Image (spheres, coloured by chain):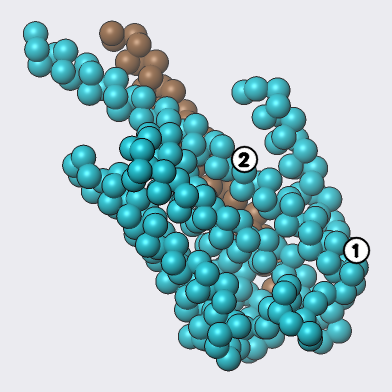
Amino acid sequence: MKPFSIAFIVLTLGLLAFSTYQALFVAPTEQTMGEVQRIFYYHVPSAWVAGVCFFVNFLASIAYIVKRNEKADALAAASAEVGVVFCTIVLLTGPIWARPVWGIWWTWDARLTTTLVLWLIYVSYLIVRRFAAGSQTQILAAVIGIFGFVDVPIVYMSIRWFRTQHPSPVMAGGENSGLDPAMLHVFFWNLLAFTCVGIIFIGLRYRLQTMEDTLEAEHAQLALEGGSQ
Amino acid sequence: MSGVFALKAAYAVTWIVQLLYLRYLLTRFRRVRREINDLKRHS
């Protein structure tokens, strides 16, 4: 592993510890919800990282369709998988927050439903990559990645377009939205920390994908050589 | 479920999911490296 990568991982671990400390002990307690509101500092950054990962998958899928570039395909695979991991965190921490605040774990409102659909789309993407056989698998996955991304802006806009049980947007949500400055800087520290974790995961997963592709190519080469003898 | 318990549960779930994913990646890395070494030895 390169020294830069090690330094980045160490920096990220420090950032995670600092941002978690800020979220738990420094950020003021919200008056209506109390301590449970602090879930926000993990829940929203996870949603942000998932959205960014799916956007990277979208761009990489287009690049693969246009140029048939194997590196773009590897990046698409890596970003989709990491996106699913963070989307899973969103879908788990959301109901844990909802139970004490709403009194229910889940409701089929627009934000929750579109997020679940988003998770299902990218789980399908990963299943196709894993189990579909034949030379068209990568193209098929890229097409799912491109069309699947349509759900990301729908998830983002769902609380603006529809009347939902989910809280109204905190950022860019109009006149009555916004965060206390003391909460805002804690939120940004967590956003930065989670983004760094996302970058590390994508980097590792991308490296793994390229190694697996190399291994597969060498196996194919060996099989060809064996067959020709 | 109290607010404090929910908070602890949500943070724990986040860490567990991330650590499980990291473990999954490292396991796959080990397996691919072993396969590459086996391939080099046989060829």
B26 on left or right of A168? left
Which disc number belongs to residue A26?
A: 1
Alpha carbons under labels 1 and 2: distance apart: 27 Å
Q: Colour of chain B?
A: brown
User: Which residue type carries mark 2?
Assistant: Ile
Between disc 1 and disc 2, whose residue precedes? Answer: 1
Which chain is mark 1 on? A
Q: Colour of chain A?
A: cyan
User: Which residue type carries mark 1?
Assistant: Val
Q: Is residue A130 visible?
A: no
Picture coordinates of residue A19 (x, y %)?
A: 81, 54
The residue indicated by pointer 2 is: A200
Residue occupying the point 80% across, 42% down: A14
Which chain is mark 2 on? A
Label 1: element kind: helix
The correct choice, above or below, for A88 with respect to A199 in the image is below
The correct choice, above or below, for A44 with respect to A224 in the image is below
Q: Residues within 10 Å of mark 2 (few under 14, many from 20)?
A: some
Residue A133 figure quarter: top left
Question: Which residue is at the far front?
Answer: A66
Residue A101 figure quarter: bottom right
A158 on left or right of A8? left
Picture coordinates of residue B16 (x, y %)?
A: 61, 54
Residue occupying the point 29% across, 24% down: A217
